[in-house]
Each structure stands twice: as C-alpha cells, then as structure tokens.
Image (spheres, rainbow, N blue to C red):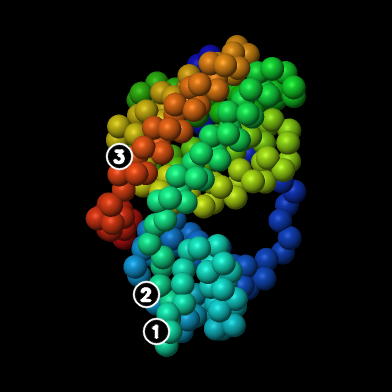
C-alpha cells in the first residue's frame, strides 16, 4: 500500500466547537505557548504581562490561568505572579500507561471487526506515513501534529466516544513531551517506520500484531520521556525562537 505524500488528515473527532469566550482563547494560547516551548518549566510571569502580550484585559487572563492551574500546568506564587510547573514525570508515566491501554484496545476493536474500519481514513493516514524516505516531512511541528492526528484517529475510529474523549485529554496532557521527542532525527525516522507497520497490520486485520506494535511504539516514546532534561527544553525553545 503506497501513496504519495499529502497534507495531514482532517481527523473528524467531534462536532464543531462552541463559540469561544475570550478566556477560552487565552487558555488555548497559553497551552500552545507551553507545548510550543514559549513557556517552559520554571518560567515566571504576571497577569499583566500576559494581558499586554495578548492584548486582552486581565479578567480573561486570570480565568484562563486558574483553569490551567487546576490542570497542573501553572501555579500561583504569593505576591509574585505565576510560574510554569516543573514536569511531573510520575504523572507522565501514568498517562503513557493509560494511553497504551486505550490505543491497544482501539486497534484490537478495529481488527476484530467490532467496528467497521473507514477505508478512506486508512488511505488518508497511509498517504502520510507509508511514503519513501525522500517524501518524509522534516518539519518537526508538522510531524508532531500528524503524529497526534494518527493516534487520535485510530482511537476515534474504534467507535467508543468516551474512550476517544479520555484519549484526547491524555493527548493534551503529554503534548509538550511528545513534541520534544520529534526534535531528534532517530525518533522521527522511527515514528514513520512504526506507524507504517501499525497501519499495515490493521489493514490485514492482525489484531495481536497491531496491538503489540503499538504497545512497543508507545513504550519507546515513554522511555525517551524519562530521559528529558531541562536543558533539552531550553534547547527546544531556542530552536523555535
């Protein structure tokens, strides 16, 4: 199954979102700042600084920050503004374990014909991942987005809406460390190779093989997460600045 390289799949995971409030917009931007290494663990800032940078009032900024605080991204400092929290590697470990359960269950459902696989979806994913070495993307941001779309699409295709919802939440929580993974060429190459094998196993309805390949793929990424240092994070920030 060979396809020319095309744009990232338009994975349809949910109905169109409701109209965002200003606080929602600030929240989404600050999460992008964290996953895009504009804000890294240990960074300190004030509500006023964020307000001026995003050209909004302090009220939506404060609302967004309290939401991010509840989700474990930032903490408020007494009379000193806010700080991006250090990585919680124990939590990442647990999230990767949960991701492994969700995704291996999903591919088994796909291969065991519990749900009908959308052939257009598989073709769309194959058009990105089953390509020659020369056709592979070298854009790390693009590749990270495609990687997320690949895994989310497989879970969504399994037909369990609650499973897909939880998986999306896990995906958001580990986004920043997954993107660090794509700063390394060997990991980018491995992602192409491993995604291709997973898709081929699904196409041939080999559930045990697909689940094993996916488990091994996620475990490799999980192992890399354990090696992350703050120096790597700052190097990633320099690369995007």
Observer-nearest of 60 and 7: 60
Q: In the rendered image, which quarter is residue 105 located in?
A: top right
Q: Is residue 199 visible?
A: no
Residue at position x 73%, y 36% in the image? 160
Q: Look at the picture and state if 17 lies above or below 221.
A: below
Can you say which quadrant of the picture contains the C terminus? bottom left
Give the spatial CA distance, label 2 vs label 3. 28 Å
Closer to the eye: label 2 or 3: 2
Across and down, in percent, residue 82 comes to 43, 76
Give the spatial CA distance, label 3 vs label 1. 36 Å
Give the labeled residue for mark 2.
44
Find the residue positioned furthest to the bottom.
79
Say whether disc 2 or disc 1 marks the residue closer to the N-terminus: 2
Say whether disc 3 or disc 1 marks the residue closer to the N-terminus: 1
Give the labeled residue for mark 1.
80
Across and down, in percent, residue 140 comes to 38, 43
Residue at position x 53%, y 16% in the image? 209
Across and down, in percent, residue 210 comes to 55, 20
Give the spatial CA distance, label 2 vs label 1. 8 Å
Q: Look at the picture and state if 2 lies above or below 166.
A: above
Secondary structure under badge 3? Answer: loop
Whether the residues at callouts 2 and 1 have beta carbons within 8 Å, the answer is: yes
Label 2: few (<14), some (14–19) or many (≥20) C-alpha neighbours in 10 Å: some
Secondary structure under badge 2? Answer: strand
Give the labeled residue for mark 3.
184
Label 3: few (<14), some (14–19) or many (≥20) C-alpha neighbours in 10 Å: few
| Residue 133 as seen in the image, left or right of residue 95 | left
Residue at position x 41%, y 67% in the image? 84
Circle on res. 222: none
């Amino acid at each position: 199954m060979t396809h020319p390289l095309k744009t990232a799949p338009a994975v349809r995971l949910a109905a169109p979102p409701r109209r965002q409030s200003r606080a929602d917009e600030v929240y989404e931007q600050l999460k992008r700042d964290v996953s895009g290494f504009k804000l890294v663990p240990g960074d300190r800032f004030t509500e006023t600084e964020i307000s001026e940078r995003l050209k909004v009032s302090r009220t939506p900024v404060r609302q967004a920050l309290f939401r991010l605080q509840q989700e474990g991204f930032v903490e408020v400092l007494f009379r000193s503004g806010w700080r991006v929290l250090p990585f919680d590697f124990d939590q990442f470990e647990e999230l990767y374990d949960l991701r492994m359960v969700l995704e291996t269950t999903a591919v088994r459902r796909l291969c065991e014909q519990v749900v009908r696989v959308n052939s257009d979806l598989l073709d769309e994913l194959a058009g990105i991942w089953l390509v020659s070495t020369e056709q592979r993307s070298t854009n790390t941001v693009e590749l990270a987005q495609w990687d997320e779309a690949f895994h989310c699409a497989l879970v969504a295709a399994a037909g369990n809406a609650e499973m897909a919802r939880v998986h999306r939440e896990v995906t958001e929580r580990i986004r920043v460390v997954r993107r660090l993974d794509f700063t390394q060429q060997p990991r980018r190459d491995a992602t192409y190779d491993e995604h291709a094998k997973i898709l081929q196993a699904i196409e041939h309805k080999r559930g045990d093989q697909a689940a094993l390949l996916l488990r091994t793929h996620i475990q490799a990424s999980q192992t890399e997460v354990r090696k992350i240092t703050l120096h790597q994070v700052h190097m990633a920030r320099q690369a995007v600045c």
